Amino acid sequence: VENEVDTTPKKKKIIVLGSGPIRIGQGVEFDYCSVHSIWALKKAGCEAIIVNNNPETVSTDFDVSDKLYFEPLTPEYVTNIVEAEKPDGAIVQFGGQTAIKLTKTLNDLGVTILGTDADHVDAAEDRERFDEILEYCDIQRPKGHTVFTVNEALSAAHSLGYPVLVRPSYVLGGQGMQIAASDDDIREFMGIITRTIPDLSEHPVLVDKYLMGQEVEVDAICDGKNILIPGIMEHIDRAGIHSGDSISVYPAVTLSEKVQKTIVDYTKRLASALHVIGMMNIQFIVLKEEVYIIEVNPRSSRTVPYISKVTGIPAIALATRAMLGEKLSDMGYGTG
């Protein structure tokens, strides 16, 4: 295979994994994140290398990065690129779940993951490990079970009581999430999930008690110690609607000062427990002034572009600088 790229090292090389083709659940918002990260890397004097295979995005324009690998985002292709480039580090936070899924591949190759490390990325996505972290942080979440079969899902739903939220683990922003109100719903949704994900032993299904509360979302930037929260976003649609289909409002309209303080406190606790460096996204449910955690994503989310534009805070640039070792206190934006 012909390789047109000069891989001779000249300055610190950083690979940024893009998000691949635009599809349901993962759109161009992640390309915004990748491009702004590349710009921040170049400004910091690094050689910015993008891996992406979507010709319709800005990140694959020839003059955006120092180098472009127009290749599929799969373990095989990423391994070949790493062996050719021998990068000083890789950024996986800005390519959605597509990039996050390649964290283990990069880790096994000995590549330094800039930002939140591979182990803590897994801790946020693994149900049992995440439950332990929530217990350690003294944070509530809706009661739920991890299941592998239809019968286990039915048993979990009966013990929790309908309605329940059914969703696969290790997916993007609620992809495949459904609200089940009966046994027939469980059978139907489990059938859909098993057609999409044949091996549930590695990607179990989560069945949670559905809380009829207000969904709230936070994007935060962390340098490993301090945290900056550009804003708290309140969803207009009911909880359980995929975040890509849900309208959110900034600043939050109906949340009390007490709830907002609790959300900020929980965000700080989780950022510390997960050793987050860079971006993180947290989804909450607020019910009768009580705050529950739905999920934590140790990466950028689809709301980052709009929260950056609305607040004027360059979230991706700050997160990238934090990954390179800078402290938020030195960036001129403060914390909190």
Image (cartoon, grey):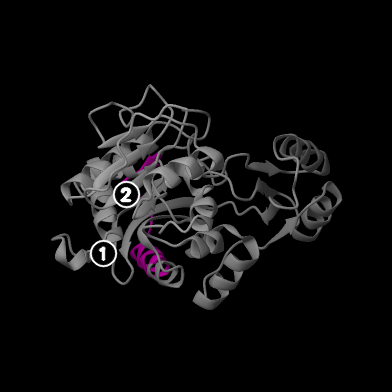
Position of residue 136 measured from the top left corner of the image (x, y, whole percent): 53, 77
In the rendered view, does 4 fall on the left or right side of 139? Answer: left
Tag 2, which secondary structure?
strand
Q: Which one is earlier in the sequence, the residue at label 1 or at label 2?
A: 2
Tag 1, which secondary structure?
loop
The answer to whether residue 17 is seen in the rendering is yes
Q: Which of 55 and 70 is in front in this view?
A: 70
Q: Give the range drawn in magenta.
A: 248-267
Position of residue 123 relative to residue 96, above or below, is: below
Q: Which of 22 and 112 is in front in this view?
A: 112
Name the residue tied to disc 1. 325
Name the residue tied to disc 2. 14
Position of residue 162 measured from the top left corner of the image (x, y, whole percent): 74, 51
- Residue at image position (48%, 41%) is 80
In the rendered view, does 49 fall on the left or right side of 19? Answer: left
Position of residue 130 relative to residue 162, above or below, is: below
The answer to if 277 sits in the magenta stretch is no
Q: Residues within 10 Å of mark 2 (few under 14, many from 20)?
A: many
In this view, the mark in front (1 or 2): 2
* CA–CA distance in space, label 1 to label 2: 14 Å
Res. 96 mark = none
Q: Nearer the viewer, residue 172 or 110?
A: 110
Specify the amino acid type for callout 1: Gly
